Image (cartoon, rainbow, N blue to C red):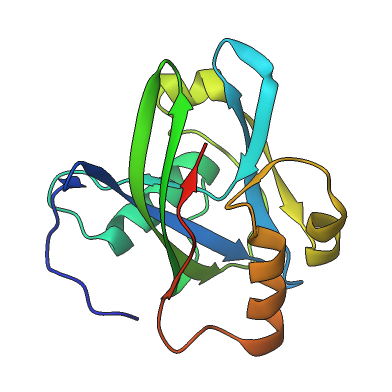
Amino acid sequence: MSAEPECEQPYEGGLRKVARVVLLDPQDRILLLHGHEPDDPADDWWFTPGGGVEGAETRAQAALRELAEETGITEVDLGPVLWRRRCSFPFAGRRWDQDEWYYLARTTRTAIAATGLTELERRSVAGARWWTCRELTRSHETVYPTRLAELLRTLLDEGPPAGPVTLDTEIV
């Protein structure tokens, strides 16, 4: 696992600090959440579980907390940071500028129970699904990060990178 400060502030340089989880099951399927604009379910996409750092928690702590809140899954082996990405996108009437770290995690539990969603998440998360790499590669759905199928294939073929890989900035 990469070293990180004991505590972090939720924002740095105007960017929201975010921890995301690339959660794999024993069959190497990845868990993605199905999100949409709160007032427009047709404007939808798939994304990894995760969210913003709160208070003095580390990104690793944020990753585990967010995973538990959004999926109910707490039995995980949290691995290294795979990727880092900066992104900017409109959502729920405002622009979100984020610095995201993607942690690898594995679990044997595949049942989902999203019991800790915020009010905004309850209005904008339509469900979750376990995807095979092949399904993700063949899908015409919008997925973030946009190269997730390719990144997952490399991860499964080569294992985690020696250090976090910086992905291209995505601005939507």
Task: Report the label total.
Answer: 0
Residue at 77%, 41% (x, y): give it: 141
Instruction: Point out residue 111 in the picture as x, y percentages from the top left corner.
Output: 67, 49
Q: Is residue 171 above or below residue 48?
A: above
Instruction: Point out residue 65 in the picture as x, y percentages from the top left corner.
Output: 36, 50
Residue at 58%, 62% (x, y): give it: 23
Q: Residue furthest top?
A: 39
Residue at 37%, 21% (x, y): give it: 94
| Front-lying residue, 36 or 69 | 36
Q: Is residue 124 above or below residue 146?
A: above
Instruction: Point out residue 167 in the picture as x, y percentages from the top left corner.
Output: 48, 64
| Front-lying residue, 97 or 27 | 97
- Asked where in the image residue 59 lies, by quadrant, the reply is bottom left
Where the N terminus falls, by quadrant?
Answer: bottom left
Q: Is residue 63 above or below residue 166?
A: above
- Asked where in the image residue 96 lies, by quadrant, the reply is top left
Lateral position of residue 2 relative to residue 120, left or right: left
Lateral position of residue 109 relative to residue 162, left or right: right
Residue at 50%, 70% (x, y): give it: 104
| Front-lying residue, 78 or 82 | 82
Q: Is residue 15 above or below residue 40?
A: below
Instruction: Point out residue 99 in the picture as x, y percentages from the top left corner.
Output: 33, 52
